[in-house]
Image (cartoon, rainbow, N blue to C red):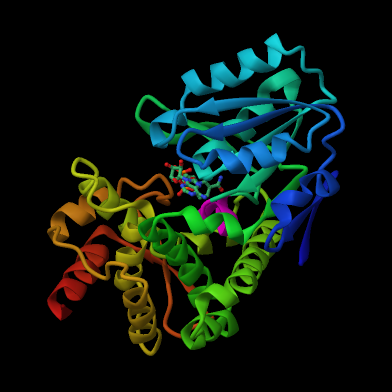
Amino acid sequence: MTLRFDSPGHGYDISVGRGLLAEASRLFDLNRKVLVVTDEGVPEEYSRKVLDQCAAGSLLVIPQGEGAKSFATLETILSELLRLGFTRSDAIVAVGGGVTGDVAGFAAACYQRGIDYYNVPTTLLSQVDSSVGGKTAVNFMGVKNIVGAFHHPSGVLVDPDVLDTLSPRLFAEGMAEVIKMAATLDAALFERIEAASDLEASLPEIIYNALKIKLDVVSRDPSEKGLRAVLNFGHTIGHAIEALGAAGRQFLHGEAVAAGMMYTSEGPARPRIEALLHRFCLPTSDDYSAGDLMRLAVSDKKRHGSLTRLVLCDEIGSYRFCDFTDAMLLTLIQKRKDEK
Ligand SMILES: NC(=O)c1ccc[n+]([C@@H]2O[C@H](COP(=O)([O-])OP(=O)(O)OC[C@H]3O[C@@H](n4cnc5c(N)ncnc54)[C@H](O)[C@@H]3O)[C@@H](O)[C@H]2O)c1
């Protein structure tokens, strides 16, 4: 299954299918110098499989985890490109989750003002979300994604087989993002997940459809000026939940988004979203006070003046933007807490 992303001056294919890792050289131009960047937590067989298909490939293993999205890692990748004599016609292949894709993509955006890179996402979250859209970044001075660039990959290869080695918790985290997109933008996909008795068999199709949603939103709002904000469903309060639990690493990002969605879903959509989140053992509540959640939610960088824009979902497959004053937001959070 192949999707195409076209933006002015740049287009690329996103190929989805089991076993595709063995076909990287058919899908990507690996007939040049290639630096395969992976992280130490990704099973080595995946990067090796890509490396074996490169005419002149080198491997670079970076540390795993959010801490690796740093200037230090960026410098490591850039040093390696320089040491190996990469020119503007050479390329990077990122084999890993969103961390590897974001930092390797940013290195590709910076080196000689931009070289090609390909994404081989290996977590569910990166397969349905971070590997497409062209956002690359590192964290700086404790602020997430604050230094980065829009730089689209030249191709994306999504092989659901690599998810076999992913922990159930990380798999569920990716499902939270799929549920988020389906709930607001694709009722048919939401119903398909609800009805799926054998998720394993439906997985390639679910990933394909989630990617289709993301690409459609990105192509209609490439520089993130409006519509793309729909992808923030669950995120504003989710970020607050994530930040409050950060010290004890209580919630992964996707888990916090799952709990965050419960604050901003209403009507008939609400019980259906809750049931699906439960099915993947994702949290649907948190223990933080309304005041603490409110304080962190209003510090979200996507705030509009004195208003916080939330994405609300009342009916599966639909959404609306709603601007909340601080008082309205506190009332909403408290109301949800009282309902629990
Ligand atoms: N660029 C974007 O548009 C965008 C969108 C969403 C998220 N992100 C970013 O993505 C990052 C999170 O990505 P993530 O959730 O993929 O986390 P991650 O990249 O940290 O991967 C999670 C862990 O899984 C391991 N891993 C990866 N693939 C594996 C596999 N197949 N089997 C076993 N282990 C595997 C990794 O080594 C890592 O320890 C964040 O930094 C976030 O900001 C970017």
Q: Foreground: 8 or 205?
A: 205
Task: Give the residue drawn at x 39%, y 79%.
Answer: 276
Magenta segment includes 127: yes
Residue 226 in view: no
Query: Whole-percent x and y of residue 313?
Result: 43, 77
Query: Whole-percent x and y of residue 256?
Result: 31, 58
Which stretch is magenta?
123-130
Magenta segment includes 58: no
Task: Give the residue drawn at x 21%, y 55%.
Answer: 293
Q: Magenta stretch: dominant SS?
A: helix
Q: Foreground: 184 or 84?
A: 84
Vertical position of residue 14 compared to residue 120: above or below = below
Q: Quadrant of the C terminus?
A: bottom left
Query: Whole-percent x and y of residue 131?
Result: 62, 49
Figure label count: 0
Task: Give the residue drawn at x 60%, y 21%.
Answer: 77
Task: Give the residue drawn at x 47%, y 33%.
Answer: 40
Query: Whole-percent x and y of residue 80?
Result: 64, 15
Q: Foreground: 10 or 42?
A: 42
